Amino acid sequence: MEELNKNSINQANQEPVGDSPPSPATPEQNTNSPLSGQAEAPSSDPQSTPPPPAPAPSTPTQTPPAPAPKPETPPSKPKNQTKKLLIVALVVFLATAGLAAAGYFLFVKKASENVTQNQEISKNPENPQNNTPDTPKDTPGAKVTFLDKWEKKDYVPIFDETIFSGNVGYNKSEFRFYKVGSYADKDILMLSVTLQPGFWMPNYAVLLSDGSSYKLLKNHSPDAFEDGKYKGPKLADSASIDYSTTIEDLMIPKSVDFGGITATRKGESVYTKEGFPNYKLTEVKRLGKKIIYEAVEPNKDHVGVKNMTILLKLPNQMYVPYHYVADGLSDDYSFSVKLDAGGTLSGKYDWIAFSHGCGQVEAINVVDKDYFKELVKIGTSSGQDVFKPKNTQTKIFQSAYKQYLEGTSSQSALSKQEVYNKNLILFVRNKLGYKAVLSNKEFAAGGECGKPVVYLYPEQTERLSVRVGANVRVSEPEYGNGWFDVLAKPNGQLNYQGQNYPYLFWEGQGFGRYPEVKSGFVVRSSEVSRVLRQQLASQGLNRQEIADFMEFWMPKMPTHKPYIRLSWLSLEQMNRLAPLHISKQPDTLIRVFLEFEGLDRWQKLPTQKLQAPQRRGFVVVEWGGLLQ
């Protein structure tokens, strides 16, 4: 939900409002891709059998008529009558059999069409032991409708009342429910959650309700499940989990095709329209009740550049981002250009050219058409024209080089002319007509979530599993697909695969969006060590955790500048950027993440309010920062 995906330090709670859905159409076929990278793709078999075919008509037994009494008429006459009767009987038999066969064929064909055209619900063959037996039936022709605008509902009692008292301390105001449509005689409800610091809970879920009982749909609530198991707050007696029902119109495909290209999904985020506030949307194709848009917005930080993404709008007013750059760019970032002047230019090029942070980047950068004149064609790649800046004085080149310097130490930075001569920034005109920006890996923008480390303090020694929602590139111990079966002791000592560790360390890029930083602290370089220690303690870190943080990050502070900006991501922002999944839900969760910047002069910023939760029960602590 956008309430869960809008990125800023000061989170604003807004009711999502979508635009009107298209008029009903035949649902898109073959879109049964999982909502989560861990979920199995639901079966396309609706498991609803059409009525059995009418039995084939039995072949009538032809019995010759009994001999008639000898007529007084000439003998030739009865012979002719018998022949005529046999012919008539044969004609009747053939006609009857033909009509029966035609009727059977039409019946089966119609039943098959009904299953295909009306398949709004399908069943996943997965059937865990705790599956509820009374899930909605998959009836061909069951009516699914969606509202033009969500209806905000009062709190829906799907959670056990005990979660709102004692040490857990959830707040009902953090759970927001909306009616978005109906299936048969049940309401389709969307649940969005504003995360409370210290506790994990699902961000986004879909339910079916008859007004007194509620079904949480696993196949449409990826944030509430980990490895197929429910990980949210305790459910009330009136609520249960439906492991099999799938609403086909809400399924999210892994890729979409239009205009001769295939766009693939990036990340797992789903947004309301408010997630793209400055984008201009242009409809390019309809897939049943779903709509594909090209979405473009100005890049406010870089002259002559826009951000472009592809959005799939679901009929419940949610938007899913997709990604397409150019045909010539390989999955391993290899890019080769046949130069007009002769020869070939090859290298590793990244489509992330103008970005910031260490989160998921869903939009590519494209050139504003008003700045096409700053480019010159140098060759082709996979039949698509490739360009470079005319010189180092163009505004686009200057903007790209400025960002390059921000993420590179001054000692190792290349000069402008070196960057230009080595063709480290290129532009390719893709099949959609956009000039997409590509930057050589030597020049690539962006950063990584630097050395986040995770401390585990269970109340008693136990084995735990830990996974992080990020593309983990460096880790200790080896991450693989997660740290499974970690032996954790109350004093924080960890043992994994026979080796002892003080914490779990990872680096990489989060699967969520990196938030826009709007507040923080500007301090003198001479005071940064003291301020960091004070602010870490203010967020709940103990002495050892503070010492570990300072040992890694203090040498990276830009103390050659007179001032340094310090900004801290909130727990809610970290949970969106790189969700932390632990096999046992912690009672206290502290996630500290620093973004910093050296400044030549003091700047006024809105001040952040730092808070430390009380450390109680099973405590999990993580600290990290942005590596440029």
Image (tube, rainbow, N blue to C red):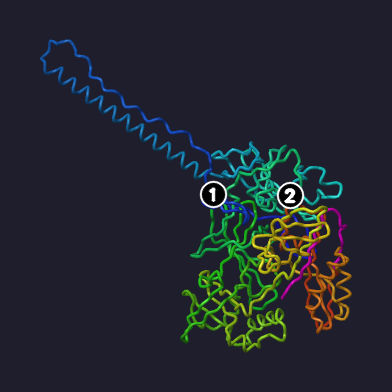
Q: Where residue 475 sits in the image (x, y, percent)?
A: 69, 67
- Tell me: 461 left or right of 293: right
Q: Quadrant of residue 522?
A: bottom right
Instruction: Report x, y in % for residue 485.
Output: 70, 56
Answer few, some or many: residues within 10 Å of disc 2's Cα (few below 14, many 20 plus, some between 14 and 19): some
The residue type indicated by label 2 comes to Gly
Q: Is residue 613 magenta?
A: yes
- Disc 2 is placed on an element classified as loop
Quarter of the image that includes the C terminus: bottom right
> Tag on residue 27?
1
Report helix, strand or loop for mark 1: loop
How many numbered markers are drawn? 2
In the picture provided, is 239 more to the left or to the right than 28? Answer: right
Q: Tell me the distance, in whole angstroms, between the alpha carbons under discs 1 and 2.
A: 31 Å
Q: Name the residue nearer the viewer: 338 or 305.
A: 338
Q: Residue at x 40, y 30 (%)?
A: 55
Labels 1 and 2: the sequence-earlier one: 1
- In the image, residue 260 sits, relative to residue 441, either above or below, namely above
Please provide percent x and percent y for residue 46.
Answer: 53, 43
Which label number is shown at residue 232? Answer: 2
Quadrant where the image shows the N terminus: bottom right
Residue 556 picture quarter: bottom right
Nearer the viewer's eye, disc 1 or disc 2? 2
Residue 197 is at least partly visible in this image: no
- Residue 212 visible in this rendered orientation of the protein: yes
Give the magenta range: 608-628
Depth check: give the residue in front, 434 or 594.
Answer: 594
Q: Confirm whether the magenta stretch covers residue 148.
A: no
The percent coordinates of residue 246 (x first, y second) are 60, 46
Name the residue rendered at 75%, 57% in the picture. 487
Q: Are marks 1 and 2 in contact (CB under 8 Å)?
A: no
Q: Residue at x 57, y 53 (%)?
A: 33
